[in-house]
Image: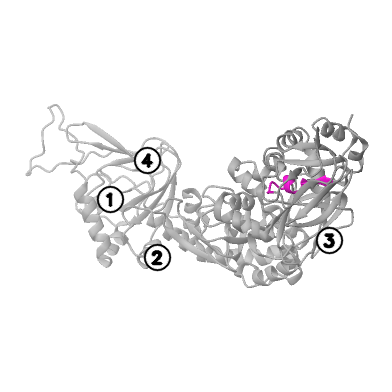
Amino acid sequence: MIPQPIDTVPLFQRLSGEERQLLISRLKRRHVEPGELIIAEGHTAENLFIIAAGWVKLEGGRATLANLGAGSLLGEIDMLMRRPYSMTARSAAATQLLVLSHNDLQELINERPSIGLKFSASIGVRIAFLEKYLVQQRLRNIELLSALSEEDLRAIAQRLDFRAISRGDVVIEAGADGDAAFFIEEGQVRLITRSHDGESFEDLENGAIFGHTSLLTGKAYASTARVIADGTLWVLPREGYQSLLRQHPAVKLALSRALAEALSEKDQSDAAERMRNLQLFADVPSDALSALAARLVLRHFPADEVIYTSGTPGDAMYIVESGEVRLTNGLTSDAQLIERMRAGDSFGDMALLTGRTRSDYARAATDTTIWVLYKNDFDDVMVQYPSVSVSLGRALTERLTTRESDLVIRHLRRMDLLSSLATSELKDVSTRVRGIRFRPGEMICFAGEPAQALFMIAGGQAKRMFTDMYGESSADILDVGAAFGEKDLVQNRPYSMTVQALTDTEVWTITKVDFLSLMEKYPTLALTVTRLMADQPARPQSFQPPRGGSPMPPHQNIPQAPRIQRPPSGARPIQTRIEMPATPKPRRMPCSACARQSKKPLAVRNWLALSSAT
């Protein structure tokens, strides 16, 4: 039976009756004679000792520091912190000790982590024996850290401090410099955030994290955290966080992906001013801007982190608070840069306003902090402030006219035929482009039909078909970026192929007159056409063999009439407006694409074409 002095030991006061019994079951008795050495300064702390009876003298050098009697502890802090003994202890008389070994304590805490937590609370710091518990039972179960490796989690655990909290305590104060992040071990903390709409509250419980925004962004705390139920916290100080990132950068990425917090009052004020400087919000009333700023969400993206990709829903717009974002046409290393967005710039707003999916890719070029306005919050403000819709509608019309031209140029650059042209040259080309849509199975052009336009596939897929003089057919597939008809235009001959849409297909056309004018104006385009023509194998023009005889090759003195392929039922041919020579020739069939000119303005036609291509 272990004597009663254990009940008076301060380290064990927080333990429940059951926890004390588990501890007692691990204790071993030891008798020491007067003058016998119990622990030696500098030696590994393998045990902690409870004096059950007798006296022990603590020594520092040659001096006696203290005499300890029954109920006192020896070496407990050194063993709990896994460090060498900090002093020497020797029995002053025959003494009875109760011994708890390092291994027994580790097994005990693995079995009942609450004991380790209560030891930490008693001495005010995290004991080393809790590392395994922190990794496997606490950090691993925090959603934002769950994907980290065992090594990363262990590195976090080694840098966490322990802190007991009581109801009414203020853990962090809004506006104060952010110097730590906090994980709730037990208890309850309320976050209080002030905004344009007043104060908002969020109650956090076991496993929640708060304050980490300050570590990621270097900003002051946006909210006040007040304890509403007694408990304990794990604290990651800034110094420990910075050393952690140097060796474990994956931790920053994990914390960043989980970051989505309301802006502080100061940031809301700054955001409203920055939004006023944006063309989109220039005419929005001040109270509506404040309401929008109050709904912004703070996000952080480490360098090279993807913000969104092409094809994803346009459910938010972004304002760069600090850092830099690159908008590109892809995510590969050779992706073309579209635009750089820096502090104060916005992006993603067109997709939010028009409801279209993203047509580009956004990636953080440096560690970047962004204010995000999500569609649900945006719509709420539109209902609350109807005048905002009018202002945004007017700004949107202006933006579409300007930005649509940029989008057309970006899509033209994807075309193999035009990829070598400069931006200023592509801008000229964009004014001559017309967009046409074809349904699956519809014919785009027919072999033997007068060549009056160049075609480029902007979206979808088409099949190109050839028939030689002996009636043998061949075909290939045209994907986005492919052009056809340019060789026929340059050589002033009918189309040498029939092209049919395989899917819903967006085709951009340039008339023969415009294309030949562009070639004359831009030598680079002429060189590209010459090269592409040289790369294409010669294909004989389709012809109609004589009746009643076997096919024979055309003779140079015998004019050959091209075989005209009539459009099948359901095709949508369009009459061209180009005047043809007056010399006799076979009956002209209508071109199914080049003259289908929409009555809508060019800006609208090109915008509609882009919606399909992207």
Report the disc number at residue 122. Answer: none
The residue type indicated by label 2 comes to Lys
Res. 529 image quadrant: bottom left
Helix, strand or loop status at disc 2: helix
Q: Can you give x and y, in whole percent of width and height, for residue 2 in the image?
A: 88, 32
Say which residue label 3 marks: 199
Q: Is residue 521 in the magenta section?
A: no
Q: Residues within 10 Å of mark 2 (few under 14, many from 20)?
A: some
Q: Can you give x and y, in whole percent of width and height, for residue 204 in the image?
A: 80, 49
Q: Is residue 75 in the magenta section?
A: yes
Labels 4 and 2: the sequence-earlier one? 2
Labels 4 and 3: the sequence-earlier one? 3
Q: Can you give x and y, in whole percent of width and height, for residue 63 in the image?
A: 77, 58
> Could you give the CA–CA distance between mark 2 and mark 3, rounded to whole angstroms?
51 Å
Report the disc number at residue 427. Answer: 2
Q: Nearer the viewer, mark 1 or mark 3?
A: 3
Q: Nearer the viewer, mark 4 or mark 3?
A: 3
Q: Residues within 10 Å of mark 3 (few under 14, many from 20)?
A: few
> Could you give the CA–CA distance between mark 2 and mark 1, rounded to whole angstroms?
25 Å
Say which residue label 1 marks: 451
Q: The magenta stretch spans which residues?
A: 73-84
Say which residue label 4 marks: 462
Labels 1 and 3: the sequence-earlier one? 3
Q: Nearer the viewer, mark 2 or mark 3?
A: 3
Q: Nearer the viewer, mark 1 or mark 4?
A: 4
